[in-house]
Amino acid sequence: MFKLRTIIPIITLVVLSACAGSERNAPIASSMEIAAAAYVSPLPTSITLLTTVNESGDFGEHTGILINASQQVLYDPAGTFRHSTSPNARDVNYGMHPAMVEYYKSYHARRGYYIVAQEILVSPEIAELVFQRAVAQGKTGKLRCAISDSSVLNGLEMFKNIPTTYFPGKIRDRFAELPNVTTTYVYEEDDGQNLDG
């Protein structure tokens, strides 16, 4: 019979494996590529936490942040999402227009996994600070998506309740406690990731 001390590290390893996707060794986008792809959303500035949730046990397996600031970008630490029209530099995806955002959600949603999108409207100044902090965070190693996301957020007063954690579900739960959060869900029934052809 397993002791609790043995079970907890096993559970932790299973949960953290979700951010351990294969490295694609994609080149870092140039400043010219980033500038060319930049998308400025007409919608109010916002921060959206995107959590990939395993239906079996309802725990978070990956986390990213959609940042609608001076441009709309996706901070996807330790993520495997790549698209030819969304330049990536150190875990920040640029050119995140609405169709690309939906593509990202579809990339992760599949049989057994769904996406929780938690959006909160913020001032342009806060949105820009989150954007700058994500860029400054740099490339994240495997298994550290939640550590990086939580570190980007909890350095700001309005997100101080977000714990620094390895667990995406903990960030999701604390984010839900923020005032005026709008939550949506994405479910799909395919068997795998929708890769860019």
Image: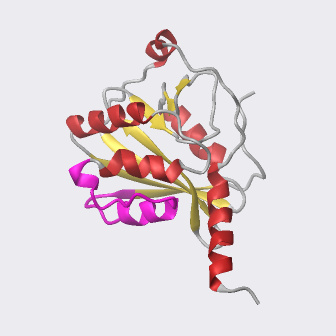
Which residue lies at the image location 29% right of the left edge and 62% below the top edge? 161
Count up the numbered dots: 0
Judging depth in this view, the residue of 10 and 114 nearest the camera is 10
- Splitting the image into 4 quarters, where does residue 104 fall? top right
Is 166 colored magenta in this rendering? yes
Q: How are the colours assigned in the image? A: secondary structure
Residue that sits furthest to the bottom in the current view:
1
The residue sitting at 62% across, 66% down in the picture is 12
Residue 16: percent from left, percent from top: 62, 58
Residue 50 seen in this snapshot? no
Place residue 15 in its image quadrant.
bottom right
Residue located 44% across and 32% down the image: 73
Query: Which residues are the magenta region?
Result: 156-182
Q: Vertical placement of 49 versus 80: above or below?
A: below
Q: Position of residue 141 (x, y in %)?
A: 58, 42
Q: Is residue 83 left or right of residue 131?
A: right
Residue sitting at x 28%, y 54%? 159
The correct choice, above or below, for 17 with respect to 38 in the image is below
Q: Which residue ends up furthest to the top in the rendered image?
A: 32
Counting from the top left corner in percent of width and height, residue 58 is at 59, 70
Asked if residue 42 shows in the view, the reply is: yes
Q: Nearer the viewer, residue 94 or 7?
A: 7
Residue 160, above or below 96: below
Residue 22 forms part of the magenta stretch:
no
Residue 180 spot, x, y in % from top left: 27, 58
27 sits to left or right of 190: left
Quadrant showing the C terminus? top right
Taking the image as shown, residue 86 lies to the left or right of residue 75, namely right
Image quadrant containing the N terminus: bottom right
